[in-house]
Image: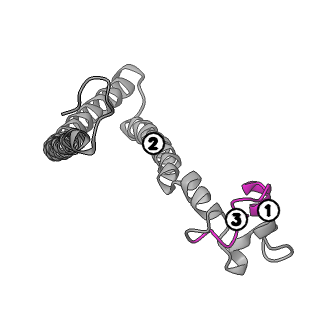
Amino acid sequence: MSVQGQPPTEADASPGVAETVRELRDSGLAGLGAAREAAGALRTLVSADLSLARSAAGRAVVLACVAVVFGASAWLLLMTALVVVLSIRAGLPWSVSLAICGGASALAAWLALHRATASFEHTRMKATRRQLARLGIGELADFMPGPGSAESAHSAEERAKPRGEGVPGDSTAAGVTPP
């Protein structure tokens, strides 16, 4: 032990350093233990969330099917009522009434199919594919400018289109897949 006013000796400094190292080790082990517990809790949470999502998706599919069945039956009843109204009230023949209702149903189906096709285009993930292509990843990488290039994706698409073959601007005629 050092006397007051005298510099500490090496023997006085050692127990403090050893104690500090022990505390640091214990803190590190406690931190690792807390990280392990947090990872386990996160794993449990993700597992429970996936289980909940899976059962909710199943319920959603069943309820969507029930909605389709009741929607179809409601549509059929409405079309029947419209045929009756057109035949009895408007005095149209049954065949004309049925043709009007069939045409209305066909038009509604065509509009729904057109919108579904347009919505389905969003599943192609075009923006993500273009960004991956700019990094040199994926099937479009040969058509896109490099990551450091100032060229836009649109100009790269125009450059990829062959000229004078098939329909103007149709790159599929040459077997080329544009971005």
> In the image, what residue type sits under mark 3?
Met
Name the residue type under label 1. Answer: Glu
- Earlier in the chain: of badge 1 and badge 3, it is 3
Tell me the magenta residue range.
Answer: 139-157
Contact check, label 1 and label 3, Cβ < 8 Å: no
Residue 15, can we see it? yes
For the point 56% across and 59% down, the residue is 129
The vertical placement of 130 against 37, above or below, is below
Instruction: Give whichever of discs 1 and 2 has the lower sequence position.
Output: 2
Q: Determine which residue is flagged by label 3.
A: 144
Q: Around disc 1, counting alpha carbons within 10 Å, would you say few (fewer than 14), some (14 to 19), or many (20 or more)?
A: some
Q: Which residue is mark 1?
A: 158
* Mark seen at residue 112: 2
Label 2 residue SS: helix
Looking at the rendered structure, the number of numbered marks drawn on it comes to 3
Q: Residues within 10 Å of mark 2 (few under 14, many from 20)?
A: few
Image coloring type = one colour
Under tag 1, what secondary structure?
Answer: helix
Q: Residue 139: where, in percent of width, then height?
A: 57, 72
Question: Within 10 angstroms of label 3, few (less than 14), some, or many (20 or more) residues?
Answer: many
Residue at mark 1 to residue at mark 3: CA–CA distance? 11 Å
Spatial CA span between label 3 and label 2? 35 Å
Q: Nearer the viewer, residue 83 or 174?
A: 174
Q: Gap in Å between the C-alphas at discs 1 and 2?
A: 32 Å
Residue nearest the observer in this picture, 50 or 93: 50
Q: Quadrant of residue 37?
A: top left
Q: Quadrant of the C terminus?
A: bottom right
Identify the mark at residue 32; answer none if there is no mark. Answer: none
Q: Please, what is the three-letter code of the amino acid marked with disc 2?
A: Ala
Q: Dividing the image into 4 quarters, which one contains the N terminus? A: top left
